[in-house]
Amino acid sequence: QVQLVESGGGLVQPGGSLRLSCAASGSIFQIYVMGWYRQAPGKQRELVASITSGGSTSYADSAKGRFTISRENAKNMVYLQMNSLKPEDTAVYYCNAHRIDSRVLAWGQGTQVTVSS
């Protein structure tokens, strides 16, 4: 069983930066892909960024050039560095883990990101 815990959310002004962290524990050997999803009020959950065990990254168009996903394997951590934040980035951000066969292993509890002046 895999457990994921997010942290680092908060209130930031437009144009500001924030770094989210996700700590993985349990049967982490099963994890192939870790990603960040977000869900804004009244909208469906969407994939923001992902990273594989080999270091391959993928980003939503809305995140490209502004967000960077990274990992520290020794600490079982994955991060999402968010720069040039916009009000439309406001959402609850969730950490997620998949197996190599794309089956979902776990979801984190979510961390709120609010971008407002």
Image (cartoon, helix red, strand yellow):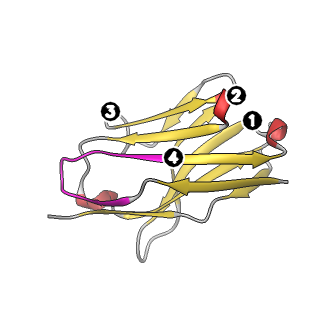
Q: Earlier in the sequence, mark 1 or mark 3?
A: 1
- Position of residue 51 relative to residue 39, above or below, is above
- Position of residue 39 relative to residue 28, above or below, is below
Disc 2 from disc 1: Cα separation: 5 Å
Tag 1 residue: 32
Query: On the picture, is 66 further left or further right than 75?
Result: left
Q: Residues within 10 Å of mark 4 (few under 14, many from 20)?
A: many
Q: Earlier in the sequence, mark 3 or mark 4?
A: 4
Tag 2 residue: 53
Disc 1 from disc 3: Cα separation: 24 Å
Which residue reaches farthest left? 117
Tag 3 residue: 65
Q: Amino acid at mark 3?
A: Gly
Which residue reaches farthest bottom? 42
Q: Earlier in the sequence, mark 2 or mark 3?
A: 2
Disc 2 from disc 4: Cα separation: 17 Å
Q: Earlier in the sequence, mark 2 or mark 4?
A: 4
Tag 4 residue: 21
Q: Amino acid at mark 2?
A: Ser
Please report contact status of discs 2 and 1: CB closer than 8 Å, yes or no. yes
Q: Nearer the viewer, residue 55 or 13?
A: 13
Nearest to the eye among marks 4 and 1: give it.
Answer: 4
Q: Which residues are magenta?
A: 10-21
- Position of residue 83 relative to residue 5, above or below, is above
Image x and y of residue 28, in percent: 79, 41
Image x and y of residue 64, in percent: 37, 36
